[in-house]
Image (cartoon, rainbow, N blue to C red):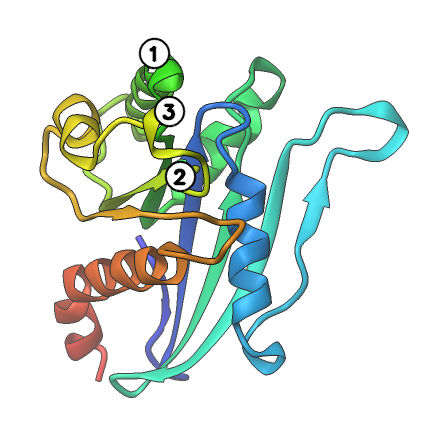
Amino acid sequence: MPHIDAERRELMLTLAVYGAPKVGKTTILHCIQDRVTPERRGNINPFGTDAGVARLLDWLPLELGRISGWQTRVHLYAIPDQRHADATRRVILGDADGILFAADAQAGRLADNLTALRSLRDNLDDRDGHARDVPMVLLYTKHDLPAELLLTRSALNQELNARAAPDFVCSALRGEGVLEALHSVIAIVMRQFAPTRRNGA
């Protein structure tokens, strides 16, 4: 649930970038940082990298300005799908208002994508153990690689996108498709909570 301050007309959204190891989650954050004007974003903040501790997450704050009369901020987190980050992952996903699910388009990574998708569903249970229905957009990454290594968009959707969520072909290294996917998930979350915003007007 977004954090809403009706008196100040402020709205804060939490979005998570999720996917298999080495799918490019941190690269996606860097791509967004590089393409958002400095006054609209902070710096990427890695957590858990001191003294040899494995990274727990990367965090990028965004300031979107006024949307429908509300000052809107986004906290964007990239979370590793490894055991050492279990507790962090559950906390972030427990607060997430939307998900950017990054899937590696390489045919050889399909099993890893499916494992990450199952992990995501397991971690989206709320604090009472019930499954949460969180808006999700899919990014099919690594499209800077030769086409013969990649599954088609249709094949990826068939395997990973049973709910027909919005999907985007992307190359985070070239900056293709990433901002479009981010805009899509923000728009979905804003539409979902539009009645809340109107009631607070």
Q: Position of residue 166 (x, y in %)?
A: 18, 48
Spatial distance from mark 1 to mark 2, Cα to Cα?
15 Å
In front of the other: 91 or 55 = 55
Q: Determine whether the residue tagged by mark 3 lies in a helix, strand or loop.
A: helix
Write down the quadrant of residue 55 in the picture: top right
Q: How crowded is the residue under tag 3: few (<14 C-alpha within 10 Å), some, or many (20+)?
A: few
Give how far across and how far down residue 30 sits, in percent: 59, 54
Front one among 198 and 106? 106
Q: Residue at x 21, y 74 (%)?
A: 197
Which residue in the structure is indicated by mark 2? 141
Task: Give the residue at x 16% y 65%.
Answer: 191
Q: The disc labelled 2 sits on which kind of residue?
A: Thr
Asked which quadrant contains residue 134, the reply is top left
In the picture of the structure, the residue carrying the numbered disc 1 is 111
Which kind of residue does numbered mark 3 sit on? Leu
Asked if the residues shown at circle 1 and circle 3 are in contact, with their CB atoms under 8 angstroms apart, the answer is no
